[in-house]
Image: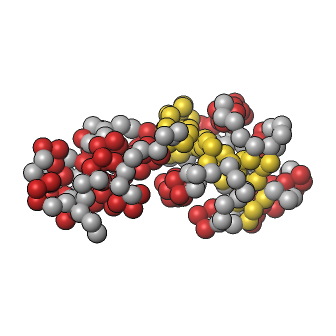
Amino acid sequence: MKDENIARKIVSSLQQCSFANLLEIGAGSGALTKYLLTLPNISFKAVEIDEEKIEFLLSTFPELEKMIIHANFLEMPRPFEGKFAVIGNFPYNISTQIVFKLIEWRSDLECMVGMFQKEVAQRIVTKEGSKKYGVTSVLTQAFFYAEYLFEVSEHCFQPPPKVKSAVIRLRPKTQPLPMKSEESFFRLVKTAFNQRRKTLRNAVQDLFNREVLRQELFGKRAEQLSVEDFAELSFKMNHQ
C-alpha cells in the first residue's frame, strides 16, 4: 500500500477504540506499522509469515526486534494475556478465516479495523434480504457490531490489484445474543445457507422436529432471516 493518507485513516479509525495491546496481522512492508509504532502507551506486536518481509521490516524499523512474531496468524496462539485490538491490511485469500479466528477470540478482542476485498467487507456488514448476506454476515454480527468505514481505490497500491478494497471495524457486542449454544447456532446458520435457494423448511429439516417445521418462519429462505431470528430459532432445535 503506497497511499499514506489511507494508512493514516485506517490507524485513526482504530484510535476511536480504547485498547492497551495491539496486534497487526500481516505487517508486510510496514505501511501501517510505521504509524502503529508511534501510538503512545500501547504494547504492540506484528505477525508476519513471510521471511523476506520480516527482514525488510527489521532493517527499516529496528525497534520491531522483539515485537515481530514469525508465524501464520491462523495457527498462532493468542498474542497477549488479556484483551487486545487487531488491525491489518489482511491477505485477501485468508481474510474470512481471519474473521472466524477473531470470533473464536472474541472474549479478548476489544476492536478490529481491517482492510478486506470490497466484496468480503460488504458480506461481513450486510443485513438480511441481500444476496451478499450469508454465513459470514450472521456469525460475525451475532458477536460484533460491524461498520463499513470507507472504500480504498486499487490505485492506492503498488502494483494495483484487480479488486477494490474496503475497511471495516468490528466491536464486540456488550450483550451477547441469547442462543441455545454456540455450536447449535453455528450449525443452524451453516446448514441454512448451505442450500440458500431452498426454503428453510427444506434446508434445515434434519435439525428440527416436524411440529416446529410447520411454523411460518420456515417458509422463508435463509437470507430473509435476521441474526436475531437465527439465534432465537436455535432454542427450538432437536437435541443432538
Which residue is at 19% across, 60% downward? Answer: 208
Which residue is at 16% across, 48% downward? Answer: 218
Colour scheme shown: secondary structure
Q: Nearer the viewer, residue 148 or 189?
A: 189
Q: Quadrant of residue 203?
A: bottom left
| Quadrant for the N terminus in the image | top right
Residue 40 point in image, percent of width and height: 83, 37
Q: Across the whole image, how many numbered discs are drawn on residues?
A: 0
The answer to whether residue 190 is above or below residue 147 is: below
Q: From the viewer's perspective, tell me whether residue 55 is left or right of residue 197.
A: right
| Quadrant for the C terminus in the image | bottom left
Q: Is residue 120 visible?
A: no
Q: From the viewer's perspective, tell me whether residue 235 is left or right of residue 136.
A: left
Q: Quadrant of residue 53?
A: bottom right
Q: Quadrant of residue 26?
A: bottom right
The answer to whether residue 227 is above or below residue 201 is: above
Q: Nearer the viewer, residue 54 or 45?
A: 45
Which residue is at 58% across, 56% downward? Answer: 105
Q: Nearer the viewer, residue 207 or 70?
A: 207
Q: Nearer the viewer, residue 77 or 126?
A: 77
Residue 231 point in image, percent of width and height: 34, 48
Q: Is residue 80 visible?
A: yes
The answer to whether residue 126 is above or below residue 195 is: above
Which residue is at 39% across, 38% downward? Answer: 126
Residue 234 point in image, percent of width and height: 30, 53
In the rendered image, the residue lying farthest to the right is 62
Q: From the viewer's perspective, tell me whether residue 7 is left or right of residue 175.
A: right
Residue 85 point in image, percent of width and height: 66, 45
